Amino acid sequence: MTDPYVTEFTVEGEDFLAAGEASNSIKETLKMLGVPSSICRRAAVITYEAEMNLVIHARGGTLRAEITHERIELTARDEGPGIADVNLAMREGYSTAPDHVREMGFGAGMGLPNIKRNADVLHIDSVLGKGTVLRAVIHFDGEGSAGGAKGRDRS
Amino acid sequence: MNLKTVTELIGADVLCVSERLEEVEVEYAYAADLMSDVLAFARPMSLLLTGLTNVQIIRTAQMLDIPAVVFVRGKRPQEEVVTLARQVKMPLLFAKKSMYETCGLLYKAGVLPCEIPERGGDVC
């Protein structure tokens, strides 16, 4: 068993021009490693929504991908304000994003649901005033398809 | 349908990467002004139509392997959007018609919609 391949990026808060660069780099890495394109897209949706959350809500943070032969583990970590009610934040349509973010096409309350739909495992640990750690795992042998096309729903 | 045909059909201008118009084929299209909706429902390799004009449109398209974007209702994208699209070789089209009419023309010509899965309320 070889060591996992790890790549990590720093994401700046409120930098909407650069937002998405880290996710794109992770996607390019996955493609380079020969990961199937449907799994690349699922990982890309997870990292991109998580990266946008870091930019919009958390004053930035880090985005990390760990890739082994069996799975991809994606971690977004921040020291932002934290999520008051994770269950509420998981609900489609619920959002605390400000108007300038909504005008960019985000903040529709679909971010975390989109992440959940594309992940085989999702853990969110959040402490108010301390920050949030979001960890999503995709297994290579999972049966799902990309982008929630089959309405993936695993709790 | 290749992008050259799309351009003629909807009367669009090409903003960048015109050299790929004949090479890029689209069978499906998705239209939205909400990027998270695009991330949830757009099929890979479908054409994206939007009225938003910021750089995140290109990023969103990149994540889903969407090969090209049509900006509708005469809204020109910001310069950094075109710059990024050139970098990633993504053709951008600019249509003066409304979202509805642009979509209608494509639908009538046989471009297929992306399926919206049945949704059972909350995902949690």
Image: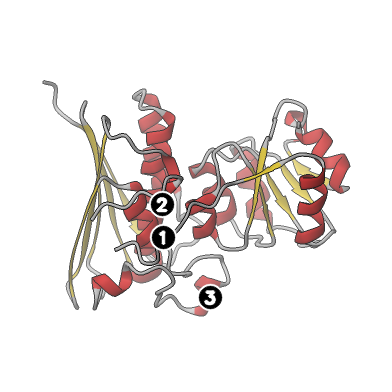
Q: Is residue A29 left or right of residue A62?
A: right
Report in which chain the residue with disc 2 lies.
Answer: A
Residue located beneath label 1 in the image = A52
Instruction: Return the mark for residue A150.
Output: none
**Which of the 4 image quadrants contains residue A67?**
top left
Say which label, 1 or 3, has the lower sequence index. 1
Residue where numbered disc 3 is placed: A100
Image height of B68 relative to A18, above or below: above
Relative to A138, residue A151 above or below: below
- Between the residue at mark 1 and the residue at mark 2, the CA separation in whole angstroms equals 6 Å
Residue A98 drawn at (x, y percent): 46, 78
Instruction: Give the residue type at disc 2.
Output: Tyr
Q: Quadrant of the C terminus of chain B?
A: bottom left
In the image, residue A62 sits, relative to residue B18, either above or below, namely: below
- Circles 1, 2 touching at the beta carbon (< 8 Å): yes
Q: Is residue B17 above or below residue A76?
A: above
- Provide the secondary structure element on which disc 3 rests: helix
- The answer, for residue B69, to whether it is visible in the render is yes
Asked whether, in this view, residue B3 is left or right of residue B27, the answer is right
Question: Which disc is residue A48 wearing?
Answer: 2
Question: Are there few (<14), some (14-19), or many (20+) residues within 10 Å of tag 3?
Answer: few
Give amino acid for label 1.
Met
